[in-house]
Amino acid sequence: MDNLQLVETTRDLDFIRESLAEPDFTSMPDVKEFDQKSKNQMISFVMSGALLLSMPSEASTFEIPTEPHGQPENLLSFLNSYNSKINTPIAAYIEEVNSISIKQNYTKREVISEILSFKSLSLNWDGFGAYPLEVESASNALYLMDLIGESVFCAVDELYPNPHGTISLIWYNKGGECVSVEVGNKELSYYVKLSSKDTQYFNNVQINDQEAKRISKFIQSL
Amino acid sequence: MFGFNKVTHKSFRKNFLKTVIFQIGFDGKIFDNDKKNEIVNLFKNQFPRENKIGNRGFQVSFRDSQTPIVQPIRENEGVELKSEDGQKILTIDRTMLSLTVSGVVYRDYYSLKEDLTKIEDFLKLSNISELNRIAIRKINLVEFKLEDNANDVLSALINPNLTVNQNYFPNSEKITHNIHSLNYRDGDAFLNIKYGLNVPPNTNTKIGQILIDIDLYKLTKLESSAIFEASDEINSEIFNVFNWVLSNKTLSMLNG
């Protein structure tokens, strides 16, 4: 108890110090007459004890507002400190765990919706005579998703229709590496651009399990 | 080191590892283009892909209190190299060398050391004779389909002594995060343990994850020749902690 370091914010904390010197809390003369100020002091005492017991060594830097309406600066300081040292790091950690385990920009449903929406585009949708996405191309894109697997496919960063009725899908990372696939009515073509390596082109290949495995491996290497 | 029961080290047949990070720190060195090219050449065989850093700033905020999963580096102040399959990332800057290995390809600690065979050459090349930090962090994630009560899975996989109060939570099937954090310090050695339940948002199928994240680092002056002796000790203690966190059922799954 002698080593406890209290943070003094208001004169009410003097009460806490004095109280700690008293072995029997209930023997204090003003306990029986509980006005609002005493109640706040009691709450401050309990809160300060709980906070000091639960927090790491940086606890002594926290300030405890005893009069929330009277001293807004202390309350803000406390909240900012709490936010930066406890709340935000916890949220950031959860975000970090989610980012290393789930790399997904779209749900499966969203991917299907996007692809079907391209099918609904009208002729000349770009003003230069573009065709809407062909049924076969849309179907092949969805088939490719089945072959590659949702968890890898749905990490796609961009998907968009091309003027000649095909669909493009691009996966990339922050290092400028990418896998770009164009799916057509009968075949697909793709290229893989990895750092320090020549770009690899795969043109007019069949949409099958073997090719899907290769594309999936490239995507996972990004 | 921190009082955990010593367990004879062995390699499990299966693992739940998502990421393993090995990191060393040293006093700031000049990192010009010539130096960068020498380093790239040194590691070219194992890490042939050199990522352009560009103007992307920091990927992950770095704090002394935690080993970052991927060391953030600024443009022209470091180099980021990847293995052919992209599952291993080596980042080097003025004050740090960090190797991040995906759980998909991580076999065991001895294979990690094989990845680091060139590290002594790197230290000689950079005139580094003394380190000021050495760290290993292992993040395990056990994923499961979320059908009933995810919190029950936590109780099954983690040592029951650590989950003894789970029945006290009301509506525990509605819990999305139940993560416990322990931080130890013994002199210049620091241990961060996080374990618990995480239900990630917005996934195609509802999944839950049991997380076991063990980060052990030493902020100490260390002769570069003693690097593997120190990392052996750290890895052994991480293994002790790992066994301590798990239930017997989980340990037998790993041995199965």
Image (tube, coloured by chain):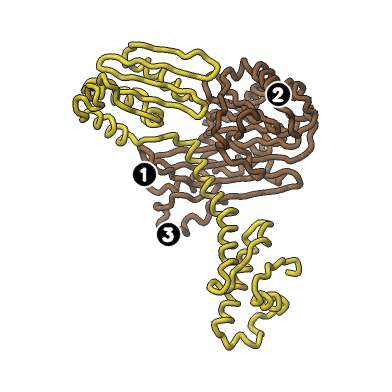
CA separation in Å, label 3 and label 2:
51 Å
- Between disc 1 and disc 2, the foreground one is 2
Q: Which residue is mark 2?
A: B119
Above/below status of A84 relative to A108: below
Q: Is residue A139 visible?
A: no
Q: Nearer the viewer, residue A125 or B37?
A: A125
**Picture quadrant of residue A167:** top left
Q: CA distance from mark 1 to mark 3?
A: 18 Å
Expressed as whole percent of the image width and height from the top left, the position of residue B67 reads 63, 39
Q: Is residue A165 visible?
A: yes
Callouts 1 and 3 close, C-beta under 8 Å: no
| Chain that appears yellow | A
Q: Nearer the viewer, mark 3 or mark 2?
A: 2
The circle on residue B147 is 1
- Amino acid under disc 2: Ile
Q: Which chain is brown?
A: B
The image shows residue A138, relative to residue A41, as above or below, that is above
Q: Position of residue A191 (x, y in %)?
A: 41, 16
Q: Which residue is mark 3?
A: B170
The chain that hosts pointer 2 is: B
Furthest-left residue in this view = A123
Q: Secondary structure at mark 2?
A: helix
**Considering only order in the chain, which callout, 3 or 1, is on the residue closer to the N terminus?**
1
Secondary element under disc 1, as helix, strand or loop, is loop
Q: CA distance from mark 1 to mark 2?
A: 46 Å
Q: Left or right: where does residue A102 sit relative to residue B35?
A: left
Q: Position of residue A8 (x, y in %)?
A: 68, 70
Q: What label sits on residue B91 in the rendered view? A: none
Are there few (<14), some (14-19), or many (20+) residues within 10 Å of tag 2? Answer: some
